[in-house]
Amino acid sequence: MANHPDDIDPESRNRLPVVHRDALEDAVKPIYDEVATPSATSVAGLQGPGGIMLHSPSLVAAHRAYNRALRSVPDLPPALKELAILVAARAMDQAFEWTTHEGPARAAGLDPRIIDVVRDRGPLDGLPEREAAIVRLGREALDERRVRPGTYADAERLFG
């Protein structure tokens, strides 16, 4: 049995209960269907942010559109998208996001050694240039709350 606070709902795995489709307005039901169906835009289904957002029907459509746009950046391969998510999850010590995205990162071909570096907050020595740039940019933006000019210039050169 998982060790978690008593106020965590066992079905949703967070403090809010899972929203049921029949409780939603008709306009929101297609979004529910998208969130509840395993897809490239919803790794965690109703247990993740998409499920939580269903508690706010007025915001959920905008949130889903934003999420789809972020996940469909054409110039960034899936492994690098997952790396960016893992960097953010680690910076925030967000175990749910880490656990949800570590498997897809591996499945997308991200080198397990890079995952270890992010998880352990290790040095970037020996990492491929693009992966190191993503980790460095994320660490600076999220840990230090600022991005050095050289880091930004490297990211711009590598990713446009």
Image: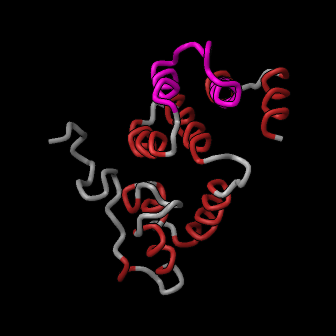
Q: Which residue ends up furthest to the left in the rendered image?
A: 1
Q: Is residue 76 above or below residue 120?
A: below
In depth, the one of 99 and 8 nearer the eye is: 99
Q: Is residue 26 above or below residue 130?
A: below
Q: Is residue 118 magenta?
A: yes
In depth, the one of 104 and 12 nearer the eye is: 104
Q: Please state the extent of the stretch shown in magenta in the rendering.
A: 111-139
Q: Is residue 158 above or below residue 53?
A: above
Q: Residue 81 in the image: x percent, y percent?
A: 60, 44
Q: Residue 145 in the image: x percent, y percent?
A: 69, 26
The answer to which quarter of the image holds residue 32 is bottom left
Is residue 55 shown left or right of residue 14?
Answer: right
The answer to which quarter of the image holds residue 98 is top left
Is residue 159 shown left or right of residue 47?
Answer: right
Which SS type dominates the magenta stretch?
helix
Q: Is residue 140 magenta?
A: no
- The residue at the point 25 percent across, 58 percent down is 11
Q: Residue 142 in the image: x percent, y percent?
A: 63, 29
Q: Residue 100 in the image: x percent, y percent?
A: 41, 45
- The residue at the point 44 percent across, 59 percent down is 52
- The residue at the point 27 percent across, 49 percent down is 8
